[in-house]
Amino acid sequence: MSAPLLKVTGLTKAFGGLVAVDKLGFEVAPGEVIGLVGPNGSGKTTAMNLISGALRADRGSIRLGDAELVGLRPDRIVRHGVARTFQLVRVLGSLSCADNVAAGLAFHPGGAFGAGARERIDALLARVGLGGREALPAGELTYIDQKRLELARALALAPRLLLLDEWLAGLNPTELREGIALIRSLRDEGLTMILVEHVMEAVHALCNRCVVMNAGVLLADGPTAEVLRNPEVVRAYLGEDVETDDLPPPHLPTGEAPTQLNLDAGGQHA
Amino acid sequence: AGPAAAQAGPDKIRIGWAVAKTGPNAPGVATTVLPNYKLWVEEINAAGGIQLKSGKRVPVEVVEYDDRSSSEEAVRAIERLVTQDKVDFILPPWGTGTNLAVGPTFHKHGYPLLAATAVTDRAPDLVKRWPNAFFFLGTGHGYGEALVSYLEQERKAGKIGTKVAMMSVADGFGVDLGGAARKVLAKHGFELVYDKTYPVGTQDLSPMLNEIKGLAPDVFIAFSYPPDTLGITDQAKVIGFNPKVFYTGVGTQFPLYKNKFGANVDGVMSLGGIDADDPAVQAYFRRHKEVTGQEPDRFASPIVWVSLQMLQQAIERVGVDRAAVSKELASGTFDTILGQVKLVDRQWPKLWWVGQWQDGEFRGIAPTDRAGARPAVIPKPAWKP
Amino acid sequence: MLEIAGLSVRYGKHLALDDVALKVGRGEIVVMLGANGAGKSSLLKAVGGMVKREPGASIRLAGTELAGLPAHRIVGAGLALVPEGRGVFGELTVRENLALGAFPHRGRAAEADNFERVQNLFPRLRERLDQAVRTMSGGEQQMVAVGRALMSAPAILLLDEPSLGLSPLMCKELFQALARIRDDGTGVLLVEQNARQSLAIGDRGYLLEGGRVVGSGSAAALGADPAVRAAYLGVAHGEAA
Amino acid sequence: MLIVDVLLAGFTLGGMYALIAMGLTLQYGVARIMNLSYGEVLVMSAFGTWFAVTRLDWNPVAVLLASLPLGYLASWLIYRVLMMPLVRRSGAGPALEVDSILATFGLLFLLQGVLLLAFGGNYYSYSYLSQPVDILGSQVAANRLVVLGFAAAIGLGLYLLLTRSRLGTAVRAVAVAPRFAPLVGIDVWRLSAIAFGIGGALVAGGGTLLSMFLPFSATMGVVFAMKALVVVIMGGVGNLLGCLVAGLMLGFAETLVARFVDPGLTLAVNFALFLLVLLLRPAGLFGRVAR
Amino acid sequence: MNALPSPAAAGNSTGAGRLALQALAVAGLALLAALPWLGADDYLIAVGINILQYGVLATAWALFSGPTRYVSLATVAFFGIGAYTAAVFGETLPWPAVLAAALGVSLVLALIVGLATLRLSGVHFVIFTFGLAELVHQLVNWYEVNVTRTLGRYLFVDISQVQIYWQLLALLVAVLATGWAIRRSRLGLALQVIGDDEVVARHVGIDTTRAKLLLFAISAGFIGLAGAAMAPRWTYIDPAIAFNPVISFQVLIMALLGGANRLFGPLLGVLPVALLFELLSGSFPNHFMILLGLVFMAIVYFIPNGLFGLLERRRQRAGKEGGK
Ligand SMILES: Nc1ncnc2c1ncn2[C@@H]1O[C@H](COP(=O)(O)OP(=O)(O)OP(=O)(O)O)[C@@H](O)[C@H]1O
Ligand SMILES: Nc1ncnc2c1ncn2[C@@H]1O[C@H](COP(=O)(O)OP(=O)(O)OP(=O)(O)O)[C@@H](O)[C@H]1O
Ligand SMILES: [Mg+2]
Ligand SMILES: [Mg+2]
C-alpha cells in the first residue's frame, strides 16, 4: 500500500459528557473509496465535521499527506484539498446554480473566476445532470437536485479528498443507479472519497473497504464484504436478516388479481 | 420700490423659526422657547401688529419648522427660511449646540441671532466673530463663579462649612459650569469632597446621592438636566439627605418641579431666578399662563421674553432693515419686564446667577446687590415626608 | 377513512399536483410511489395544509371535510404529517418536541402511553430526552420527527420518507413499527424511496407521475408489476422471476 | 450601610430594566415582530397613568388594573390588524424582519406624533410612594420596590409558565420554528397575537410603574426601547428569565461603577458589559438560537 | 435574523434595463454635479447636501450589509468618529490631512470592531453594533470630560457649503465605483456566499473573517469620511451631536426601503425619504410625525420588496407585455 492520503489517529470529540468520536483511527490510501458506516448517532457526521474543520477536535491528529489538519479553519482545509457535502443539503438558495458552482471555483488555488470560469461551471453542472439550469436559483431545485448541485460545488474545489455525507440517501432505485455511476466515474478518475452511507447497495457497489463506527469508537475496518458480515456489525448496524433480494409479501391475498392496475408509465407527462 | 415704498414700509413682517418639536431637545423647547414665541406673536397681532416708525402697525406672519433636535436639520431649516421663505427675522432655536450650529448661517445672511438659550464660555469670542449675534444667558463661568462667591459670603458669615460635594452632567453645560466652580471653589479654600460627572440619560443617580450623603457635605451642587434634577431631588428626599445648601441644575426652575415636590422645594437653589414681586414680571407670568396654558420657567423663559421684547422694540425703532436692527440691539436701551436693558458687548450683563425657591416662588438671590435680590435661606429646611 | 379528491397544487405557473384522488382506509398502509419531482411531497403537504391547495379539493376524514381548514386544525382532526426535512423544533429538547406532539386535544388522553410507546420504538430517544434536537444526528432527528407525529394519536399518519437517514437496522424496526401502528387501526400514507420495504408492509399503493395518479393497486400487484419493478425496485425488466 | 445601599440600588435599577424589556422579549421572541414603537407604547401608558392620577385622582397602582388589559387589547389589535398582513405576506420568512422594522418605525412616528399633539414636548411627572422604606439601615423609595417586585413576579411567573406548561412550550415552539408549529396543531396566529398582546400588557404595565418615579416626555420612547432591546438581546431573545438576569446585571454594573469607579462611566460600562456578554455567548445569556 | 431579502427574491433585472438604469444614474449624478452652477440657492444646496450625505452613508452601509445581510447600526459610530476627528484637527491641520485622519481613525475603529463583532449574527449583530456605537459615544464623552475637560468643540474652518457639497458628491461617486468594482470581484461573490450560508462559505475556502473585515472597513472608511466632510457645517460639535443614533436608523431605513442588494438601491431609498422628510417637516411642522408615520406604513404595506423591487417588477411586467 502506498503512503496514505489521509491518516486519522486518536481522533476524539466530546459534546459535554457525550463522547461522539472516541480515539478514532483509520487511513485512506490515494484513489481509495471507503465507506464510513455505523448506527445512527455513532459519530460519522461528527468525524466528517472534524476532518473538514467544521468542528475542532479535542484530541488526535488528522494528516492529509504531509499536512496536519487539526486546528486549521475550514477554509484552510479546503485549500489543502478536502471538499465535502452536507448530510442536510446546504446549497446557497438565493444564488443561481451557476453561482453556487462559481463559489466553489473562486476561492482556492487553481480555481477560476469570472469569464474564465464559465466553461468549467457549465461542465460541472452538466456532469451532475443539471445542465441547462445555470440561471435557476438553487432554492427552487428539488431536494435531490440540490444534492447534485452540492456535489458539483464540492467538485469545483478540485479536491484530493471528497467527503460525501449520505449523498445517496433518498434516491429511488433508478436515481440511485445514476448516482452510483456518477460516483464510480469520479472514483475511476482517481478521486479519493469517504462515503457515509446507510444505503448498503451503494456501499457494496462503490467501496472496497469499510470503516464501521459504533458509539463513537471504531468497530471494524476491512474489506467491505468481510466487514459487513462481521457479527458485531450485523448486530449493531444491519440487523439480523440481511437483504433478501425479493419481496416477502406478507399481505398478499393469495390468488387475488391486481386491482385496477392501469399503468401508463412514461405516458403523457414524459 | 422707491423711497416712498420704503417709507410706507412692509404690510407684514415675516418671522421664521426652526425649533425642536421632536427629539431630545423637544422638552426644552416646549418649556422655554415655543410658548414665548407663541405669546409674542399673539400679543403683537392682538395689538394690530408692530408699530413702525411711520406709525403704521404691521402684523407678523410666522413660518415654522421642526429641526428634530439635529444640528444638520437646524442649519438646513434656517437656510430654507432665508432663501425660500425669505423671512424678515428668524427667532433662534433652543440650546447651546443648536444655536452655535446655526450661527454661521445667520451670520452669512446677516440675520440677528438672539441666542437666549445658549450658555457658552466662548460667547465673548463669538460675538466678535459674528457681529449679528447676541448672547443672553451668560457663560458657564458666570454661574459657577457667582455661585461660589455667594457661598464664600455665607461661609464667612459662618452659616456653612467648607465641605462641598459636586456632581455634574457630562455635557457642555455640566463641564463648563463644573469646571468654573471647581476652580473658584479651590481658590476660596472650599474642600471639594466629591466631584464627579455622570452621562446624559443616566436613569438612576441614587448611588451617587447615597455616596454623597455619606460624605456629609455642607454644600451640595448638581449641575444637572431636568430629568436628573427631579431624580436627584427625589432621591435626596428619600434618603433624607439635608445639606445646608442644596443646589440643583436646569429643571429646578420649572413649574413642574414645584408641582412635584410641593412645599419641599423651599430652600432649593439653582441658576436663574426672578424678582417675583415685580409687577411687570407678574403680568408676564399671568399672560404666559393665559395664552399658552402653562407657566413659564423661572430661568430662561423671562430672558427669552426679554429678547423678544427687545427685537420688537428695535424693529419699532428702525424698521425691518436687519442691519439696522442688529445695530440698534447692540447699542440701544430697551424697556423690558426685567427693567431697562442695555447689552454690553452684545451680551446680557444683568443675569440672576443664583436663585432659590422661597415662599413658593423661585427668587433671585445673587447678585446680591441687584434690585429685588432676596437673602438666601440657609440652611435649607429639612425634607418633609 | 381518508378520502381525497380533486387535489391540485400550483407553484407559480407550475402545476405540481393535478387533480389527485386517493383513499386511505382504517388500519391500512398505503404506499405512494413516484419519481423524483413527481409531487409526492407536495401531495402530503397539501393534505396536511402546509401548502396552498387549488380550489375545488376535497379532503374528507371519516366524513368530515378538512379542505377548508388551516394546518393546525387538520392536525387536531387526526392527520399527522412528518414532512420532508423533518420539521422538528431544533431548539427544543426531545422531551419538549414529543410533548408538543400531544398538543392537539386528541393526543392528550393517551399521552403517557404514547410517550412510552415512542420511547420503546426508539430507545435512543429515551437516552436523550433532554438533548436539544438541533444537536442530534440526522437519524436521531428523524426518530424525533416520527415519534412526535405518533404522539398526537393520529387517525391517519402521513409520512414523507421516514426512513431517510436511518441505519438499515433502524429502518427495519421502523417498518415493523409502522406495521404495528397499522394493526392498531391507524391509517398510514407512506411516501418512500425504499419501495422494496414499503411495499413489503404496505396494503395498497398508488403511482404518481408528473403530479397525476397514473396507477394504483394492491401492494403485491404493484410489487409484481414489471414496470414498477423496473422503475422503483431497481430490478431491470425480465431480470427477476 | 454601603453594601445594602449598593444591593438595593442595583436591584431596583435592574428590576426596572428587566421590567421594560420583558414585553419586548415576548413580542420579538415569540411574535417575531421587532417592535420599534415599543418605547412609544410605554410612554403612552405613562401619560395615561399621569392623566388618571393627576386629573382623575386614581391611585397609580389601581391604574395598573386598566393599563394591563388595555395594553393587551391594543397590542393584540395592532398585531391582528397591522402585523398579520406582513406576517402572511412574508410567510414568516426573512422579509418579515425588514417589514416589521419599517412598519413599526412608522408606528413609532405615528404614536409619538399623537403624543406630541396631545401633551406637547414637556416633561411630566408626579409623586407617588416616594416615601423612604428603611431596609437594614438604608433608605429606598417605596415605588422602586414596587417595580422590583413586579419585575421579579412577572419575570419568574411567566418564565415558569413558559417552561413548565404545555402552552408555554407551544409558545416557544412558535418562537423557534413558526413554520413547523402547525404540524403539531399549534395555531401560530392565535398564539403570536396572544404573545404580542401579553407583551403589550407588560409594556403598558411597565409604563404605569415607571411613571411613578421617572419623569417622562413624549419624545423619550426611543430611550426605553433601546434599553429594552439591549436587555432582551443580552438575556437571550424570548427568554423572560434572561431579561431578569440581564436587567439585574446591568443594574448592578451601573450601580457598582457609579459607586466605586466613576459615575461618568456607567453607560459605557453598561454597553461594555453587554458587548462582553455577547462575545462570550453570542446568543445571549439564555439564548440558544444562533441564527 | 436574515433581515434582508435575498437578491434572488428581489428579482433579476434584465441587462438592458440595468443599462438604462445606470445611464439614468450617471445622468443624475452629472446633474447633481452641475447643481451649484445652475444657480441653486443655499437651501437647494443644503437639500442636496442632505441627500448626498445620506446617499453616501446608505450606499456605503449597503456595501457591507447588503450582500452579507449583517445589518449594522454602527453607522453613526464611524460617522461620528469622522466628524469628531475633523473637529479635533480641523483648525490645526490642512483639510486633506483632516480627511485622511478621519479615514484612518474610522478604519482602525472598524478593524477593532470588526474583529470583535463579526462572529455574531442576526439580530445579535444588529443590537451589538447599536451598543457599540453608544459605547464609542460614551467613551469619547468620558475622555473629553475627564481628560481634555472640554466638551463640545468649535470648528471654524474656511469651507463653504458648495465645497461640502462637492466633497460629498465625490465621495458618492467613489462609493458607487467601489461598490461596482466589488460586485465584479471575487470579494463580491464571497460576500454573497457569506450572506447566504456562512458555513458553506468557509467550506468553499472563503476566509470569511477576512472578507467581512475588509468590507466592513471599506464601508466604515467611507462613512467616516462623510462624517468629516459634514462636520464644518455645524461649527459646534459635541458627542451628542456627532453620535446621534437617529442617523444609524435613518440610514438603515433608507437602504432597506430602496433595496440593499442593489448598487443603486439605497440611493433609490434615500431620495424619496429625504425629500419626504423635507416636504412634511416643511409643510406640516406640527403634524410631521403623524404624517411621516402614516406614509411610512403605507409604503411598507403597498410597496413590499422596497422601491427597487417595485421598479423591477414594473419593468418586468412592461417587458412582458411589450413582448407579446
Ligand atoms: N453539538 C452537539 N451537541 C451534543 N451532542 C451532539 C452534537 N452533535 C452531535 N451530537 C451527538 O453526537 C452523536 C454523534 O452524532 P453524528 O451526527 O456524528 O452521528 P452520525 O453517525 O452521523 O449519525 P446519523 O447516521 O444518524 O447521521 C449523536 O448521538 C449526537 O446526538
Ligand atoms: N416551493 C416550491 N416552489 C416551486 N416549485 C416547487 C416547490 N416545491 C416543489 N416544487 C416543484 O414541484 C414538483 C413536485 O415536487 P415534490 O417535492 O412534491 O416532488 P417529490 O415527488 O416529493 O420529489 P422527491 O422525490 O424529490 O422528494 C417538482 O417539480 C418541484 O420542482
Ligand atoms: Mg450523520
Ligand atoms: Mg419529496
Image (cartoon, coloured by chain):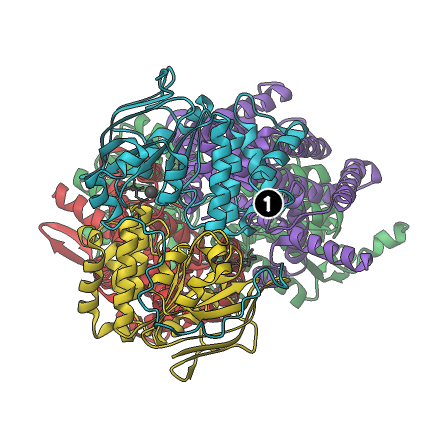
- Amino acid under disc 1: Ala
Q: Which chain is purple?
A: E
Q: What is the x, y in percent for residue D66?
A: 33, 74
- Tell me where residue D34 sits by quadrant: bottom left
Of A103 and E95, which appears nearest the observer?
A103
- Tell me where residue A95 sits by quadrant: top right
Q: Is residue D33 above or below residue E178?
A: below
Of E19 and D160, which appears nearest the observer?
E19
Q: Colour of chain C?
A: yellow
Ligand 3 located in image quadrant: top left
Distance from mark 1 CB to nearest ligand 2 atom below 8 Å: no
Q: Is residue D243 above or below residue A265?
A: above
Q: Colour of chain A?
A: cyan
Q: Which chain is green?
A: B
Look at mark 1 in the image and give the residue it sits on: E260
Left or right for C123, reference D26: left
Q: Which chain is red?
A: D
Q: Is residue A149 above or below residue D32?
A: above
- Give the residue displayed 82% in from the left and 36% down from the top: E37
Q: What is the x, y in percent for residue C207?
A: 49, 65
